[in-house]
Amino acid sequence: MSQVRRGGRPSREASEQLGELILDAATDLFLTHGFGATSIEAVAQRVRISKRTFYHRFPDKPALFAAVVHRIIKRLRPAAGIPLIEGADLQKVLERLATFILRAAVSPNAIALHRLIVAESARFPELTEVLAREGGTEEAITLIAGALEREVKTGRLKLDDPIFAAQQFLQMVVALPQRHGMGLGPPMSKRELTEWPRKVVDLFLNGCRRNEPMR
């Protein structure tokens, strides 16, 4: 890793580059060694900066961790302009959403982050708060619930609580693949992961569609 130039007031570009270098180092250290075992000193040494320079950008380790989580999640989001809930076919809309969500949930960084939270949240409960704030779960639930509410208004779905249904759908999409990705079960094949969104949507909608009365 190249050494950041010392002396003088850094340019905006150099300051942004330094911020990225700090986040690169912190991401690697957090995901490899955990939150508790990663110190500010270790991050500063990795980037070859002083602790004073570090503290100009991050007030403490939890703030650094929050920035790391925010950047991981940001990089896992679909590119701007990609339609997520557009279209009249709910099956296709939900499959599209499930595909994006699943791809993000089983990515190496997401699995490593989830493993870190599970391992260390008892000692550092603030980690779950960071993940809840930065992780985008509520945003995903809002998107899914919005698509469901649209179908409820047309009468094609019967749901008393679209938010609750969206929460359950999200769990169906990510819970088992994420567990397998963490090693709690045999690895899922590429084909299984490809077919997973369609299977989840089929099961979910069959439980939500309005039943026709028996004749």
Image (cartoon, rainbow, N blue to C red):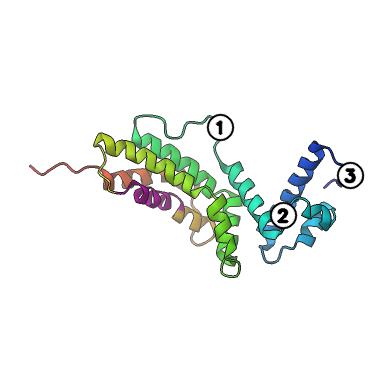
- Label drawn at residue 80: 1
At label 2, the amino acid type is Ala
Q: CA distance from mark 2 to mark 1?
A: 26 Å
192 inside magenta stretch: no
Q: Is residue 182 above or below residue 169?
A: below
Residue at 63% over, 53% down: 66
Image side of residue 157 versus residue 50, left or right: left
Q: Position of residue 110 (x, y in %)?
A: 57, 51
Q: Residue 100: x and y, percent?
A: 49, 41
Disc 2 target residue: 26
Determine the residue positioned at 46% across, 51% down: 174
Q: Earlier in the sequence, mark 1 or mark 3?
A: 3
How far apart are labels 3 and 2 at the CA level? 20 Å
Is residue 24 rendered to the left or right of residue 185? right
| Circle nearer the N terminus (2, 1) | 2
Three-letter amino acid code of the residue under disc 3: Arg
